[in-house]
Amino acid sequence: MFEFETELSEVLAKRGISRRQLVRFCSLMLGTLAMPERYLAQVVQAVGKARKPVLIWLQFQDCTGCSESMIRSSHPDVADVVLDLLSWEYHEVIMAGAGKQADAILDRVVRDDKGKYIAVVEGAIPTADGGVYCTIGGHSAMEIAEKVCRNAAATIAVGACAFDGGLVRAAPNPTGALGVQEALPGIKVMNMAGCPHNPVNTAAALVHYLTFNDLPALDQYNRPLFAYGRIIHDQCERRAHYDAGRYVTEWGDEGHRKGWCLYKMGCKGPMATFNCPVAQWNDHTSWPIRAGHGCIGCASPRFWDHMSPFYNRLPNIPGFGVEVSAGEIGLGLTAAVVAGVTAHGLIKMMKPAPKPSEAPAESAKEN
Amino acid sequence: MARIVVDPVTRIEGHLRIEAQLEGSRISDAWSSGTMFRGIEIILRNRDPREAWIWTQRICGVCTMVHALASVRAVEDALQIEVPDNARIVRNLIAGSQMVQDHVIHFYHLHALDWVDVTLALKADPGKTSSLAQSISNYPKSSATYFKGVQDRVKALVDSGQLSLFASGYWGHPAYQLPPEANLMAVAHYLEALAWQKDFIRIHAVLGGKNPHPQTFLVGGMSTAMDPNEPFAVINPERITFLRKLVKEARQFVEQVYVPDVLAVAGFYKDWFSRGEGLGNFLSYGDYSSGNQKDPGTYLFPRGIIMNRDLSKVLPVDPSQITESVSHSWYEYSGGGEGKHPYDGETNPKYSGPKPPFDFLDVDKKYSWLKAPRYQGKPMEVGPLARVLVAYASGSKEVKDLVDGVLKKFNAPATALFSTLGRIAARTLESLIMAKHLETMVEELDANMSHGKVAIFNPVHWDPDSWPNSARGFGLHEAPRGALGHWVEIEGKSIKNYQAVVPTTWNAGPRDGQGQRGAYEASLLNTPVADPNRPLEILRTIHSFDPCIACAVHVVDAKGRDYTIPKAS
């Protein structure tokens, strides 16, 4: 079927996984990335490389929720990612080694795989008072991030805290916390915003990177468009109720039991972008609005300060002093997103996509 | 005398550093340091107390939801709100499933590699592994072919030269005692547990929208609206069927995999029934009410204190006796003083440790971002062992039968529970109890719904205009890692002061003003260390507590610093 069949079979045999598992996994990833099936061969080939790309997962001012979210990944299984897709060499919450043996791994990867490995960062980086608010092995988070991220092929910031400082940076930001792209200006970073990040998106973005040797198209906040390009309100399963004026007005009322719109209970869906309603969580089981609670806009920039108070109706949010409808806010937001796309992401998106028949090495060069 | 430093302590939540003094081949003293600080409680000030749970939940994403529960309970206590019965049940279901899932992950993914040498699994005979597995459990995945498949996967990983997460383990360390077959079985179940935990936690997606950080708590109840006749109700008969399936599978996994594995592994490490003892003081707030949360008499895990290893007496818990010391923590108290009760708590972060990068902490002075909680001035251990001991000493038949069964199996006295293995055994046994009770909770919920009892939220004080001008309250919860308490003070319509006293702060906290060690520090004393360059023994005991450092480092009221917080509305 594929021209590289023989080579691929050997690689798979070596890795102890079936070809069918691999193809299934790659198809799912293409689905999430909203890419046509004709790229399948290319994705399969990239994922089936003999030497697995190295990944380093750093944790700074975090709650480990994004690590936990990653190990809840169902498609692919986390075991498949960690054992088969990548060589996941450093991740404090789950790695075998500790102390100096753990430190030694970081040093080795930065030295031997310089410019080739992927760095993932979870948690904010404290910049106040010389970095004393987060140290690992006696080194400040900033020192470690400088060493690891500056020498990586690309850095993926997972979760709100690594994206823009998240909760740690909420007023009054006691520790001078920043997200990765602000703490380390100039590095190549992709932000998987959300509290936590959704592992479906992160896995898909990783596969995109492995396949095309480039990050997917990003918006003005360096978030991939495939996951952060659409407003929650527009994808919401309760949207018809909003349009028909059927609202929950008290928790547990008739409308609440019937699954009506949560706008009046403070839902931030109309001004938040994320593919939460479509990707959902935990093997596509549910998402917050389905579970009866409003959206808190957790994938939006500086959401802790900008989206709270979480139970106030949208127009009462600071910055929206005038009485505007949710629809109008949504409209303004779409315009902002589109403007950002034009500036940063669309150029990449519009580049001619590599043809499936081309060797991946060629397309890698092109990118 | 050599100083051993383990930093980062991995396979835990958060940033923990252990420094230990070695005399000969034994640890003569130890210091536990939390090396990360965020200041969440400073950030909480002046915000809407109804949303405090959304913020405090982010204290930790491993024991996700425990801070949400303690927070809504604290605010409900302050505003005197009773929650409907269904809210009690759904909260118990969310918390109970968190406990079971968390404990399984802890054993397999955070702790097992201290006892299991992955590389030895390659030497196992799959046929013999199958016989071993079938001799201890009726778990269906136990054929020689199955174990051969797992072994091939490990072999492929080793042959690739890219060992991924397993690259830096202490493989070949003399303290590993399992035969190859037990190693292979454990590796297989490491992978099975990884697959199971993500399936089981769909229970949080149903009842919370997602995990980590479920999003359905409310001050006054839950947002999971119930209706037996509505297809779009969060809880309806179809969802109950799904919950029933998940909790049944959880019980099977615990009974057929987790419990037999722990007992099998423990059999090869009996020395650890007399190591890692620790303080001998245990505190449990108790939790999981069958009716009225205000009445500890209704709790599945009872409330109580055991002092000085005396299992003949269970002392009452008086929350007003809790204080926190900062004598060895990087904070200052205005006006000095040794301990402050959470209501009067204050935290002025003031780092006085070495400037990073550094090699050693100055352990004679301040050396941690954790405070040192004390009960009547005494350090206490909290967690599964504390819960099980308090239940055991209180005469809970369910707990007593299980504990006595395990002690009999190992021909060990009750004092063997005060140990590293005792903590592991207690965690396993309470998972067994909880897994069984999860089934009861689903049936309770179903029974309420079938009888038309669908209230899940009490609206009486949702409107802040109905609140008194000032109020304060606290909420307690037995989280997977132990006794958790939140204290809140509300003034006007917003938070004036907020404080969390957290399980790992009790266990991992530093010394107090009297020089009394915290639980981790005490538990490491006299531990033999075979190879100071690979201090596996330190990891074994520290991991037996299941550290959660993000939880443990918290900060309250920063009266000493001038923070300007924009008014939240």
Image: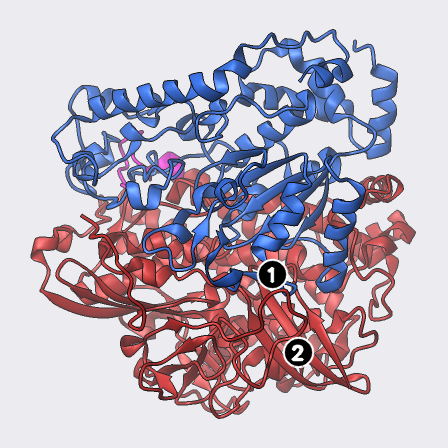
Chain colours: A blue, B red
Q: Is residue A211 visible?
A: yes
Q: Nearer the viewer, residue B10 or A110?
A: A110
What is the quadrant of the C terminus of chain A in the image?
A: top right
User: Would you name the residue on which mark 1 appears?
Assistant: B12
Front tag of 1 and 2 = 1
Q: Main secondary structure of the magenta part?
A: loop
Q: Residue at the spot x=39%, y=62% of the render?
A: B39
Q: Which mark is on residue B407?
A: 2
Q: Is residue B445 magenta?
A: no
Nearest the camera: A86 or B273? A86
Circle 1 — which element?
loop
Which quadrant of the view contains residue A152? top right
Identify whether A254 is placed above or below B196: above
Q: Quadrant of residue A326?
A: top left
Name the residue rendered at 23%, 53% in the picture.
B50
**Compared to B559, does B109 lie above or below?**
above
* Numbered range of the magenta stretch: B225-239
Q: Chain of mark 1?
A: B
Q: Residue at x 48, y 42 (%)?
A: A182
What's the amino acid at mark 2?
Leu
Pinpoint the chain carrying mark 2: B
Q: Residues within 10 Å of mark 1 (few under 14, many from 20)?
A: many
Q: Amino acid type of disc 1?
A: Ile
Q: Residue B250, percent across and down?
A: 55, 50
Neighbourhood count class around disc 2 (C-alpha, 10 Å): few under 14, some 14–19, many 20 upward: some
> For this view, does B98 lie left or right of residue B176?
left
State which quarter of the image contains the N terminus of chain A. Answer: top right
Residue A256 image point, x, y percent: 22, 36
Asked if residue A98 is positioned above or below residue A202 in the image, the reply reads below
Judge by depth and name the residue closer to the eye, B40 or A222.
A222
